[in-house]
Amino acid sequence: EAALTNNQRTAYNYFVAKGFTDKQAAGIVGNLMQESSVRPEAVEFSGGPGRGIAQWSVGGRWDRDRAGNVTAFAAQRGVSRWALQTQLDFIWHELSQVGGYGLAELRATTTLESAVTVFQNKFERCGACAQGRRMTYAREVLAAYGGTGGTTGGGTTPPPTTGATCYSGTLERDMPENACVESKFDGAWYQCANG
């Protein structure tokens, strides 16, 4: 249900403009959707250390890491650390300038699954990764923005049932095809379609 907001579209277009393939960009954005729904103001649930679209940790990559951190990066440029553009630029900075975050491995991927996994393991370095959700989100992004299909709209006939489910962050469980949920994140209604 966190899929397909302007932030997700902006992030996808940003990474395509950096030379990533549709699948690679969708893999990155699928990870960011799992981390924060691509909300730059996101603070980890229950006051944990994660901040921003990639949930960089307070005391580390958010504000203290000597190799580079979001706070110092933003201050050097005179921009807000909470801005989407700043955080996208910092991801690119970590990938291309800091190193060790999997840029070469990510560029070498040819499938959506491998792009999701590389970004998850090399950049996010998550504990409980929920890789299935990252894949679901990445598929939604690829279908919507990658030129491989997408959803149709405007008619009154519901989409055909595929048996696929969609993960609801609001309800914290998978929902069946065609189920609708009002998101606690943005108040909008989302319908599960084709996983």
Image (cartoon, rainbow, N blue to C red):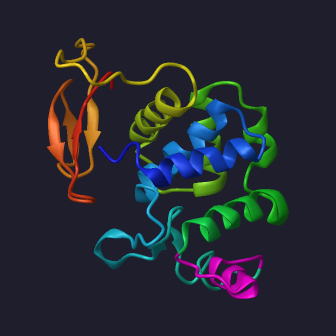
**Residue 120 in sight from this viewpoint:** no
**Residue in the picture at 27% in, 50% down:** 169
**Residue 44 in sight from this viewpoint:** yes
In the rendered view, tell whether residue 193 sits above or below residue 68. Answer: above
Q: Position of residue 23 (x, y in %)?
A: 62, 31
Task: Give the side of residue 47 with respect to residue 161, left or right.
Answer: right
Quarter where residue 105 is shown: top right
**Residue in the picture at 18% in, 25% down:** 178
In the rendered view, tell whether residue 192 sits above or below residue 27. Answer: above
Is residue 171 inside the magenta stretch? no
Is residue 68 inside the magenta stretch? yes
Q: Which residue occupies the foreground of this view, 147 or 108?
A: 147
Name the quadrant of the C terminus.
Answer: top left
Q: Which residue occupies the foreground of this view, 63 or 194?
A: 194
Task: Give the side of residue 170 with respect to residue 104, left or right.
Answer: left
**Residue in the picture at 55% in, 66% down:** 84
In the rendered view, tell whether residue 171 sits above or below residue 160. Answer: below
* Residue lying furthest front: 154
**Residue in the picture at 64% in, 32% down:** 22
Q: Where is residue 148 in the image (x, y as percent from the top left)?
A: 54, 20
Q: Which residue occupies the foreground of this view, 50 or 125?
A: 50
**Range of the magenta residues?**
67-82
Q: How many labels does the image show?
A: 0
Name the quadrant of the N terminus.
Answer: top left
